[in-house]
Image: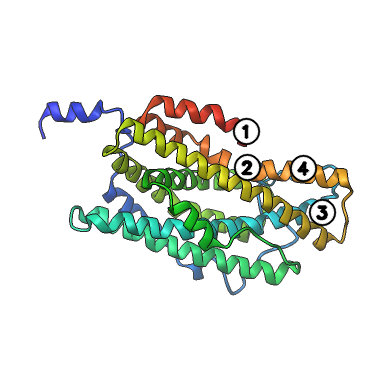
Amino acid sequence: MNTATVTARTNNPRINNHGYTYQAALAASQKVNWRIEDIIGGDRRLDFSKPFMPESLARVEPLGFLTESEKRTLNQIRGHAYLCIFGLVEEFILPFVLDHARPQLDEDDFRTRAFLQFAGEEAKHIQLFKCFRDEFQKGFGTECAVIGPPAEIAKAVLSHSPLAVALLILHIEWFTQSHYLESIGGNQQLDPQFKSLLKYHWMEEAQHARLDTLMVETLAASLTAREIEIAVDEYLEMGGFLDNGLKAQAQFDLEAFERATRRQLTGNERAAFLEVQHQANRWTYIGSGMTHPNFLASLESLAPQLRKRIEEISPVFC
């Protein structure tokens, strides 16, 4: 490759100068590879005397009408929803990654192996979240409903254009990074077992975020500016679809809370609960992804105005 070619590629506004490569992502994934048996089972049990989720995600403290014990119960209910919703999103990420890898199996060996590793790890994560959910249900003692079914949500998401889906996945991959960092900050006394879930998930998702960044760039490279704008429109449509689900999840969590605590909240308390917890869900699954600097950098590499558009919308979900 001559110097002129290198310069032209470096100045391409659709190339994000992050330095990610398939070979490096594959090597990092192989280095941090772990087994489900290393995380859960045996003496490793959830401790229901402790909160599971960082307060920055759970946002139970604003509900001043709850006792400390009730706040911990709600925090754990939010942890259960986290297990279920993450298991749900992994179920559309897995087939999408496989579909993306399949057409170019003979073009780049490192690319093929990296995406197959990506897919294999997502399958492992689905099983991991199921194992944690099973343990939660055994120890919590109260049924907690969750949005779904996963197959219908996956069908709705995968009906959109490949770039739109890749952007949504990139959004998810990056917010898993901030969620773990938030769980270890602020000297929080979280259950070590649940924190280990966030940690080990974070370790592999770091490579997935890099691979999905490359996927977004590859998909965008063959599209016009208008087609990219339409894909961002679809990404936002999926965000609205998810937001409706998160509003329903807040209602499910309220019902689980009242069953678990045997406390019937007043009308005003219920309204406050739903408002605070819907917004907490919005931040956890939408706002923390839309505002992640690496996600915004990918949007800017596609077109600066796309980043600006998301930055103007994101405060609604924060």
- Distance, label 4 to label 1, CA atoms, is 20 Å
Question: Can you give x and y, in whole percent of width and height, for residue 206 in the image?
Answer: 43, 48
Q: Are marks 1 and 2 in contact (CB under 8 Å)?
A: yes
Q: Which residue is mark 3?
A: 70
Which of marks 2 and 1 precedes in the sequence? 2
How busy is the neighbourhood of tag 1: few (under 14 within 10 Å), some, or many (20 plus)? few
Which of marks 3 and 4 precedes in the sequence? 4
Q: Which residue is mark 4?
A: 61
How busy is the neighbourhood of tag 4: few (under 14 within 10 Å), some, or many (20 plus)? some
Please indicate whether residue 219 sits to the left or right of residue 48 in the image: left
Q: Secondary structure at mark 2?
A: helix
Q: Secondary structure at mark 4?
A: loop
The disc label shown at residue 282, or none = 2
Which of marks 1 and 4 precedes in the sequence? 4
- Distance, label 4 to label 3, CA atoms, is 11 Å
Please indicate whether residue 148 sits to the left or right of residue 4 in the image: right
Q: How is the image coloured?
A: rainbow
The label nearer to you, 1 versus 3, is: 1
Q: Which residue is mark 1?
A: 316
Screen quadrant of the C terminus? top right
- Distance, label 1 to label 2, CA atoms, is 8 Å
Question: Can you give x and y, in whole percent of width and height, for residue 313 in the image?
Answer: 56, 30
Which sits in the foreground, 176 or 99? 99
Q: Are marks 1 and 3 in contact (CB under 8 Å)?
A: no
Q: Secondary structure at mark 3?
A: helix
Q: Are marks 4 and 3 in contact (CB under 8 Å)?
A: no
